[in-house]
Amino acid sequence: MTGWRLLLTRPADESSALAAVLAEAGVYSSSLPLLDIEPVPLSDAGRAIFQALDQYSAVIVVSKPAARLCVELLRQYWPQPPDQPWFSVGAATGQILSDAGLTVFYPDNGDDSEALLEHLVLRQAVARPDPKVLIVRGEGGRGLLAERLREQGASVDYLELYRRHLPDYGEGALPAKVEAERLNALVVSSGQGFEHLQRLAGDAWPALARLPLFVPSPRVAEMARAAGARTVVDCRGANAAALLAALREHSVPFSNAKDGYVSETALPKEDLDQPAIDAPVETPPPVVPRRGNGLAVVALLLGAAGVAVGGWGVWQVRHLQTNNQQQSAQVQALNDQAQSLKLNEQRLSERLAQLPPAEELEERRRLVAQLQSDQQHLNQRLETVLGASRKDWRLAEAEHLLRLASLRLSALQDINSAQALVQGADEILREQNDPGSFAAREQLAKTLAALRSTEQPDRTGLFLQLGALRDQVLELTELAPEYKDRGESLLGLTADGDGASRWAQWWDQISRYIRIDFNADENVRPLLAGQSLVQVRLALSLALEQAQWAALNGQAPVYTQALTEARDVLKNNFNQDNPQSKIMLERVGELSKQPVTVVTPDLTGTLSSVQAYLERRNLNAQESVKPLPAPGAQEATP
């Protein structure tokens, strides 16, 4: 594995961590980040989704940047995260969420969406009634997870926290780096990373496509092969362990010193040092046996035996070399496992270092015990100061409820509220299970029966109906606002002589209020005009407003008087043949028959009965705790 020279294309921080692991395994690597992570502000819709985080059956985080940004949002909006399963595509992403105290699940057989969809816990979460799944990702991520989850009946929402773009590199930066550092393999961590790799390569892509390309999943492998990559290695994961395993399974290509790139063939290092033993051996022509020439036959047999022994020896050497390679691979795998265990041990050590020391834990335990002791003392003092049990408080609450019910009846005539309060007092007495409360509960039952038989007037409805009539007052109009002389009245007759006579002036004033029509064929009613109509409308509106006030306050005499005045104004000042006036007059007559007050039951007897029960109970309690007289005192009494 020491012959590999890799180009890492992950973001800068991830490439640094991966390069450190590869360096420990003896693999040279160089970093050229092709993904630049830029956080995006949280929109109003995203903020609403995150504030409703507890409504989701599962939360899936698809990348390490999404996990880091999500943990920051959790600290801001959810100091105590909801109890729900979290899922990640890879182990590294899951470790970030696990360090934040979340319950995380991720697949063991791969670092891709397909492996996560087969996870048992995710299937169980989606199988719940009306499942909702939240996917935390970057802008423009893959839609496979959402499609498959929706096919299973889940509702899927996205929370996009960052965007990825190609850093600004000069033209030819990628092939120049590969040639300068004599790199012999490329590593990408996602489909978008491969797209950026191909875009940055430009015209040099056909040459770079000959290099071995290590990808994290079959999907990215298909993309690479479709783009012309010749040697594509699927690591089945994006972590360091998966990359190291793939490097061990593939031979290191040898470089071409003339152009700096790698040839298409690979040859194991051991084969370069071995002689060619598989070359065909020229078979000597058959020798015609001759009589008496036995030595030649023996020599031929010995030569054949020597060739056989030599071939067997070479086979043994190759077999030993193969075993040696297998043992080396096993040793390397054990070394990788040891490195993984070492990393886990370091993480555990860091987490243990964050925990407080034993002295501090003991001090906290002592403080908690002291706090519990102080709380018990306070509870005892509180019971001593109050001097009453829970039953006494409940009985006092029943008396208070009856007082409130009496006040609601006398002040507001609120039947429904009073009934609820009396019902609550009866429930409290029922909880006591005391035969002495029979008389009090009997009075409560009678009061409840009386309240249920009393109808509650609809004061709010009357108020609204009267308000509607007030709005219609402005629509009432007169038939003739003002009388205009057309030459047919007496004024026209008297004005034919001298128009300045006193009789003409007097008649001019009278004709404004009186009209004489000698040709009238129907009754003429007095009509309003000008300012008088406005005043009558105001009087009618005030009468209806007074009726509204009386309806809300339960003043029946005022309510009846106000509607009578409104009816008189309609009859005396508006044309009763007008449909508007006629309909309003009928509505006023109907509303005047509606009750606005009610005769409420008297709760004085019920309240007195409950108070008497409480007094008897208190007397019995005092007698039960009274100390018995001493025996000497009884003997001294004559």
Image (spheres, grey):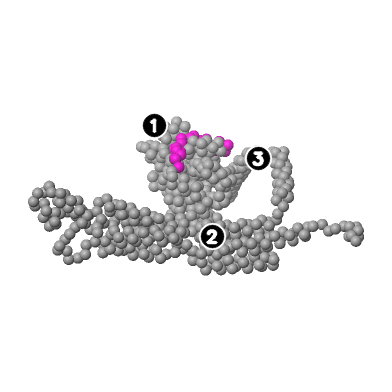
| Disc on res. 170 | 1
In the foreground, 127 or 556: 556
**Mark 3: which secondary structure?**
loop
Range covered by the magenta-colored residues: 22-42
Within 10 Å of disc 1 (Cα), the crowding (few <14, some 14-19, many 20+) is: few
Q: Quadrant of residue 180?
A: top left
Q: Is residue 256 above or below residue 377?
A: above
In reply to whether residue 34 is colored magenta, the answer given is: yes
Marks 3 and 2 in Cβ contact (< 8 Å): no
Does residue 501 appear to the left or right of 560 in the view shown? left
Q: Does dot 2 land on a helix, a strand or a loop? A: helix
Amino acid type at circle 2 is Leu
Residue pictured at 46% horizontal, 33% vertical:
182
Q: Given contact means CB atoms under 8 Å apart, are the residues at marks 2 and 1 in contact?
A: no
Q: Tell me the kind of residue under disc 1.
A: Gly
Q: Horizontal placement of 185 versus 586: left or right?
A: right
Q: Nearer the viewer, residue 250 or 386?
A: 386
Question: Whole-Å distance between the Cαs marked 3 and 2?
Answer: 64 Å
The circle drawn on residue 355 is 3
The residue singled out by tag 2 in the image is 409
Confirm whether residue 378 shows in the render. Answer: yes
Q: Position of residue 251 (x, y in %)?
A: 51, 42
Residue 94, magenta (yes or no): no
In the image as oriented, which residue stretches furthest toward the left? 497
The quarter of the rendered structure image containing the C terminus is bottom right
Question: Which label's residue is closer to the chain start, 3 or 1?
Answer: 1
Label 2 and label 1: CA atoms lie apart by 87 Å
Which label lies toward us, 3 or 2?
Answer: 2
